[in-house]
Image (cartoon, grey):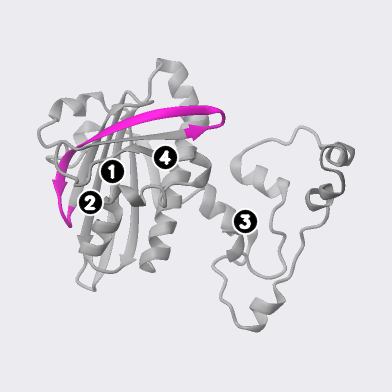
Amino acid sequence: MIAGIGQGYLLSTPVQLAKMTGCRLLFRTPTLIFKILFGEASSALTGSQNVYPEVLVANGFNFKFCQLSDALLSEFRPNNVKVLKYNAKKSKPNLFAGYETTELKGQYQLTSRVKLTGSQENVFNFFASPLNLGLLTPPWMKFKIREMPDRIVVGSHIRYSVGLWFVRLGWVTRIVQWEPDNKFVDLQEKGPYRLWWHEHLITSNDDGTVIMNDTVIYKIPYGIIGRIVHRLFIKKTLMRIFNFRNSIFSLRFQSD
């Protein structure tokens, strides 16, 4: 994201970041603290970050974002990822295909969509490979595969872990639908959610482009406390994760 910011703008400012994420800056951190902790290296944190990409501009590089606010908006408020309360009456017909009882447990619904250039087969194969899951997951999640099958079929289990702060979370997912080049569905069997049902749907357009659609039906544990945590943290984190994944897809398959 930072590499895509246009000429003459600060790469990062606490004020703009706080405004975009809804955080409040209660007090400033004295420069002396950074000097005590990092010595001379503190200048990298406290000095000006106002830079001008002379070489890139001279060579006609086209920046994705020309304003810092646009880059932050794309990162923290993506328009291609949405989270709403789940409404079973409005869900797609046959979404659960043999697991209809799962429908009654849904609490929230996440939808994600990205338009790509490439064949439907290549997009499916790239996304369906467990080996690429790490590429599609933000580095700060510390994603690690623990166990996976040599060949994915209905009933296959994938075991992996993710990290949030100092907490390591184990996750076991089972493939419940597998339709090569079109879609597959995984269902959480062990993990932090009471329900996590994830449909990956890949379709082709007449113009040769491919649409990658994700639909996640999930439920948070711990009642009202869980709902508060979801509103303050989980929802935003999920949107950032799926937005990151869409950006990787866009780079890999050159989306519009």
Marks 1/2 in contact by CB < 8 Å: the verdict is yes
Q: Marks 4 and 3, Cα distance to the nearest angstrom?
A: 32 Å
Q: Image point 81% across, 57% down: which residue?
A: 48
Nearer to the camera, 21 or 29: 29
- Measure the C-alpha gap from mark 4 to mark 2: 24 Å
Mark 3 = which residue?
Answer: 69
Question: Which residue carries the number 1 mark?
Answer: 215
Q: In this view of the protein, can residue 138 be seen by the observer? A: yes
Q: Amino acid at mark 2?
A: Leu
* Mark 4 residue type: Lys
Q: Which residue is mark 2?
A: 201
4 or 2: tag closer to the N-terminus: 4
The foreground one among 71 and 198 is: 198
Q: Of helix, strand and loop, which one carries label 3?
A: helix
Residue 136, image x and y in percent?
40, 51
**Could you tell me which secondary element the residue under label 4 belongs to?**
strand
